[in-house]
Image (spheres, rainbow, N blue to C red):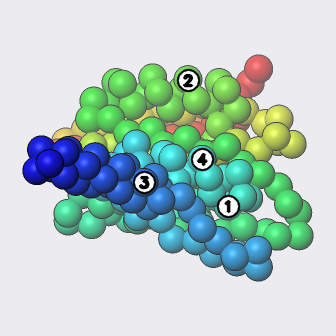
Amino acid sequence: MNRLMATLLVLSATLFSCFGLAWAQNVKVDAQQTQLLLAASSTDTLQKELDQAGALGFRPIMGTTRGNGEIVLLLERDRKTGEKFQLRLIATNATGTFQKEISDAALQGFRASPRTFLNKSNEIVVVMERAANRPQRYEYKILGTNQTSTLESEWVVATSQAYKAAAVITRTEVMLLMEREATK
């Protein structure tokens, strides 16, 4: 009997923790609500919450990171338009991988939300959004260096290629997110 009780107790605790985790990832909003704050340390959890928030019409306006590795995002929606968004969180440690992932997302119609370009414990992060009724495409270039004079030179070159500075962060180097309208 004790073994059966122990098994039932473990099973109950497991089910409770699974349901508790799923509940914590559900974005709950009032029909009249126009502002939403999301906060998570796990990028997987945050992506799930962004998926739900975008489907409810929310889009990111800005973000920050906390010392504990948590990403905090402020989102808003315009209830009058009823517009829905697909939101994608790009997060990686390697600059080259980040360049590839942000470029791939841009080819799919996503645009970076510049005020969400963040350094999360040396991980490069940005939230990208895509709305169905906006056909404009963008291209991105990441400039990163320890030398400010080199960054300035690269910035001037990128500007001559029609890129505009969108956001800047610091890690071990200064990183500049550049954006331009796609020519295709």
Label 3 vs label 1, nearer the camera? 3
The correct choice, above or below, for 31 with respect to 132 in the image is: below
Q: Which mark is residue 58?
A: 1
- Which residue is at 44% across, 61% downward? 24
Compared across the picture, whether 76 is left or right of 164 comes to: right
First in sequence, mark 3 or 1: give its number.
3
Q: Alpha-carbon neighbours of circle 4 within 10 Å: few (<14), some, or many (≥20)?
A: some
Q: Residue at x 48, y 45 (%)?
A: 47
Quadrant placement of the C terminus: top right
Residue bearing the label numbered 2: 104
Question: Helix or strand or loop: what does disc 4 sit on?
Answer: helix
Which amino acid lies under the numbered mark 3 shown in the image of this protein?
A: Phe
Q: Secondary structure at mark 1?
A: loop
Q: Earlier in the sequence, mark 4 or mark 2?
A: 4
**Residue 175 visible in the shown view:** no
Does the rendering let one see residue 50? yes
Label 4 sits on what residue type? Asp
- What label sits on residue 19 in the rendered view? 3
- Disc 3 to disc 4: CB gap under 8 Å: no
The disc, 1 or 2, on the residue closer to the chain's N-terminal end is 1
Which residue, given by chain and number where applicable, does mark 4 sit on? 51
Residue 91 left/right relative to 121? right
Mark found first going from the N terminus, 3 or 4: 3
- Residue at far left of view: 2
Disc 1: CA contacts within 10 A as few (<14), some (14-19) or many (>=20): many
Q: Amino acid at mark 1?
A: Phe
